[in-house]
Amino acid sequence: PLLRQIDGLQSNFAEKQRVWEQVEVGLNKRCVDAEGEARKAHERERVALDRLKMLEDGQAGMEVRISSLQAEASRLAAELRVSKEESDAYRRSEQDAVADLEVHKAHAQKKANELAELRASQRKSLQEESDKLAAERDEWGVERSQLTKKVSNLEQALMLAKDA
């Protein structure tokens, strides 16, 4: 019984030692992972600080650029006022030209309508002539067919007369 108890204790100890080794391996892996994450976080912090410094350096340049752009905006506003005045003058000229154009368009439209009416009239008369020709052609076809029958009948009668 004592040996069995010693065997049981040894197997229990071996099992607990194996479980402890697994726990230790898991903890070591977590430590390594945590150290890796800490390095990554440190690197991200360094990159963020570098970016912050770069942005702060850029801010000074941007302020100079802003004042330059404000001066340019003032100059452009003055040019815009002059351009608007010129645009108003051109717009008045354009309105006069549009009025003249409307007169010419109306005249051109009238001529186009007259031309369209003339073409429609010509098409109608051409269609009528075409229809007449088609009707005459049909009549001639019927006459030809009748004449062909008559000739055929006469030829048969002639053949019968020769044979008789």
Image (cartoon, rainbow, N blue to C red):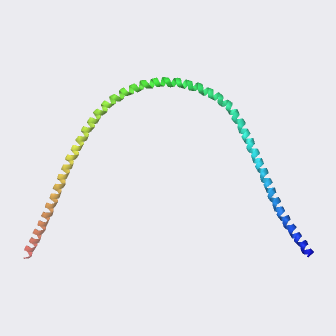
Q: Quick check: 147 left or right of 28?
A: left
Q: Quadrant of the C terminus?
A: bottom left
Q: Quadrant of the N terminus?
A: bottom right
Which corner quadrant of the image does residue 116 belong to?
top left
Which corner quadrant of the image does residue 153 belong to?
bottom left
Q: Quick check: 133 left or right of 63?
A: left
**Residue 156 x %, y %:** 11, 71
Which corner quadrant of the image does residue 144 belong to?
bottom left
Residue farthest along the right direction in this orientation: 2
At x 45%, y 24%, the residue is 86
Residue farthest along the front direction in this orientation: 1
Q: Quick check: 59 left or right of 37?
A: left
In this rendered view, identify the residue nearer to me: 133 or 42.
42
At x 58%, y 26%, the residue is 72
Q: Quick check: 91 left or right of 6?
A: left
At x 65%, y 29%, the residue is 63
**Residue 62 x %, y %:** 65, 31
Asked if residue 135 is positioned above or below residue 56 in the image, the reply reads: below
Asked if residue 77 is positioned above or below residue 117 in the image, the reply reads: above
In this rendered view, identify the residue nearer to me: 52 or 122.
52
At x 23%, y 41%, the residue is 117
